[in-house]
Structure formats: C-alpha cells, structure tokens
Amino acid sequence: MSTDEKLYDVCIVGAGFSGLVLAIKLARAGLLVCLVDLNRIVGRRILSTGNGRCNFTNSRMSADYFYSNYDLGFIKDNHTEILDFFKELGVYYKDLDGYFYPITNQAKTIREALENEVKRLDIQLFLDNRVTDINREADAFKITTNRTIIKARKVSISCGGLAAATLGSSKLGYKIGTKFGLKTTKLAPALVGLTSKDICLKELAGVRAGGKVTYKNYSCEGEIQFNKDGISGYPVMCISRYIGLDELDKKLSQIQIDFVPFLNEQELETDIKKRFEHNEFNVLEALLGLCNEKAIEQVVSYSRIYSDTNVSKLDNQDIDNLVYNFKNFGISITGTKGFDHAQVTAGGIDLNDINIDTMEAHNTTGLYFTGEVLDVDGICGGYNLSWAFTSAQLAANHIIKVLE
C-alpha cells in the first residue's frame, strides 16, 4: 500500500453528484482537494438518473418536496443557482413544466460536464479506491483505502446511501458516522417500485393508467405502471419510502388507487347514471372513456358484474359498487423491489447530529456529510440531485470560510 505524501485541504469520499459539486466549488476557491471513489469513473450513478435524461432540478423547490425525521425548513428555492452552475459548465437546459433537463436529453452531458471541470481544476482523483477506514490524527484525518493512505485537514462523506448497489452504493457513510458517534435513522428503499401477488395484475400487466395512489395518509397522482408482479410509476415512487419503512416494521397495508381523480364520488355517480340511460350498451361499452379500458374491466370485475351485462339490468347497488371501486381500487402490497431497484435511500445520518447550516458534524470538527447519506430524500422530479447540490453548497461555503 502506498501513501500519498500531500496534506490535502479536503478529501471528499464519493465522486457522485454531491461530491463533484463540492470538489469543484472548493477547488475554485483555491483549496487543495481530492476525490476518492470505488468506481472507475466519476459520477457513475448520474447516468441512471431521470431514466438516462437527468432531471437535475425543479422550479417548484421547497421543503414540502422532501422527507426527513428533521424539520427541513432550511431548504430554500435555489434552482436558478443550480441552473447557473451548469450553464457555467457549458450545459444548456430545457424546462418541461418546471422539470429541468440538459438540452441534449442525456444524463451523460451532466456527468461529463462535471468531469471536465474536475480535470480543468486539476483535482486529484483516487478512482477504483475503496475506503476501508477513516481516523482522526492530531489536526488531520487519515483516509485508508484498499490502495493508498490519504491525509487531509477536512473530510466530506459524500458517498451516497444503499440505493443502486450495482452502481457502487455501500454502507460506508453510515459506518463512518457510527464510528464518530453519529446516529443513523431507519434505512429503506425510496423511489422504488412495489411488489404484489394480486391476481388482477396479470390482467393489468403492461397498462399505464392515470390515477391517484394512496397509502395510509400519503397520496400522489400521476401515471401508474402495472406489471405482472407489482406496480410503479411516478405516484407510486413518490410514496414508496413509507411502504419501505413499513416493510421493515412488518406493518404493510393495502394501497388504494383512484382511477377517476378528476371526479368526486357524487360527480362519478351522476356520470355513471347518465351513461346507463343508454340501455342498448353493456357495462363496458357504457363506461368507455372514464379511464384505461383494462382498468375499467378490473373495476367491473371487482364490483361483481359480468362485463357483458346490459346496463338496464344494473341497480343502484351495482352503481355504488362501481363508484367505490373506481375511487378505491385496492391492491395488496408484499413490499418494495428493494435497494437494488431504488433510486434513493430513505433515512440516513440523523440531522440532529449535523449543523444544518454547514453540514459539519456537531461532535467532530472538520467532518462533513453531504447528499444521500444524510436523512433527506425527495420525491421524483430532480429533488434528490437538488438536495445533493444544496448540501454540497452549504459545506463548501463553510469549508472555504474556515480555511481561507
């Protein structure tokens, strides 16, 4: 094992989005910075964000779009700052109803822009290096990897969480936090699909239908994607963290789908009665256009009505059943698809142990945490990358101030 003889101002463990932003901001301020990562390229996970398109921020930015066990009122709208940062790196963007993507529609544009700036600033990279330990020695930290030993005045743990293990995630950040006396909250997969054994999914497999998904007190509306062994899609992903946490505690409940969220129950009842006035139709023909036809078939089946039944033979009880099942279509959940399929981790290093203005550990001067490793996760829409940027910015501002 070799030893790097330099004393770096800052060693950043993790060359993902947060670590790269932090490194760039520190190096621009003239600090000697190095990045350590177990992958062979920087920003590998960026390539998978936004289905390969990298939705990197959102114009609707506030604490309301994030989850934590801590009050996140300190999160402010900084999406214009994020846009300006990437504009400086040569990345033009497009605005799709407040969701911002690189104009190229390619996540690799973001990754390569960050990599190019790291190269321009001559930031030292220790790639294909797995950190095995971090120790505090006098006025410096000693970072031990499987290949070398690095010394730095300050360290930032920016190595992500447990999501997407095939792209290099690990428990390292939580282990380092524990070693230095920081607590970690419960960890669960978030922004992840759900699994189910319900027989209705065999009929709904391949369907994409609009609707509102509710799990206990949590709801979200958007396009739902059905497959033979579960469901996913925007509204499912946004509330999946709660299902993941309940899976840990073995407290899973059903999810409810409202296939007609644009009508309340009374309006839907009135609509169905009007449709049934045309008594030459069977029930499927009469309900055509309310939502996806496969969803209609399952609602009719759940309501114990044969699909070829003429509407003239249906009574008020049948209509009540249809209204209920359109608005409360239940699916039993067996869990999430796990961390390997998750985009982010729910839970992390407890923010009660972190100075939220600086991202520095309360009990260890010079030890910082940024990004996914912390107990903050956002819904779909560029929020998790925005948090990665925000936390890196807070850490950078403080480090630059104390080292200048």
Image (cartoon, helix red, strand yellow):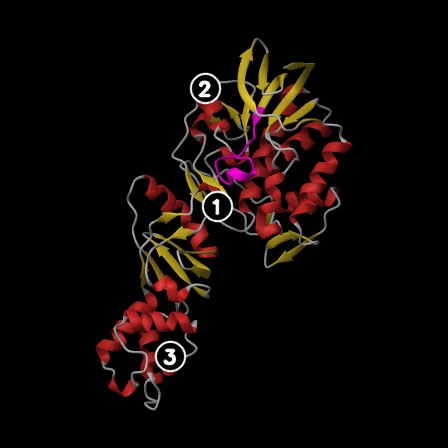
Front residue (pair 373, 263): 373
* Rendered location of residue 198, percent (x, y): 32, 59
Q: Residues within 10 Å of mark 2 (few under 14, many from 20)?
A: few
Front residue (pair 112, 398): 112
Vertical placement of residue 397 versus 189, above or below: above
Q: Residue at x 43, y 39 (%)?
A: 68
Dot 3 or dot 1: first in sequence order is 3
The three-letter code of the residue at mark 3 reads: Leu
Q: Secondary structure at mark 1?
A: helix
Q: Residues within 10 Å of mark 1 (few under 14, many from 20)?
A: some
Q: Main secondary structure of the magenta part?
A: loop
Dot 2 or dot 3: first in sequence order is 2
Vertical placement of residue 31 versus 42, above or below: above
The three-letter code of the residue at mark 2 reads: Lys
Which residue matches tag 1? Answer: 341
Please state the extent of the stretch shown in magenta in the rendering: 156-169
Q: Secondary structure at mark 2?
A: helix
Answer whether labels 2 and 1 touch (C-beta < 8 Å): no
Which residue matches tag 3? Answer: 287
Q: Quadrant of the C terminus?
A: top right
Q: In the picture, residue 201 is in which quadrant?
A: bottom left
Which label number is shown at residue 179? 2
* Rendered location of residue 275, percent (x, y): 36, 84
Q: Is residue 346 magenta?
A: no
Distance Cα–Cα, label 2 vs label 3: 61 Å
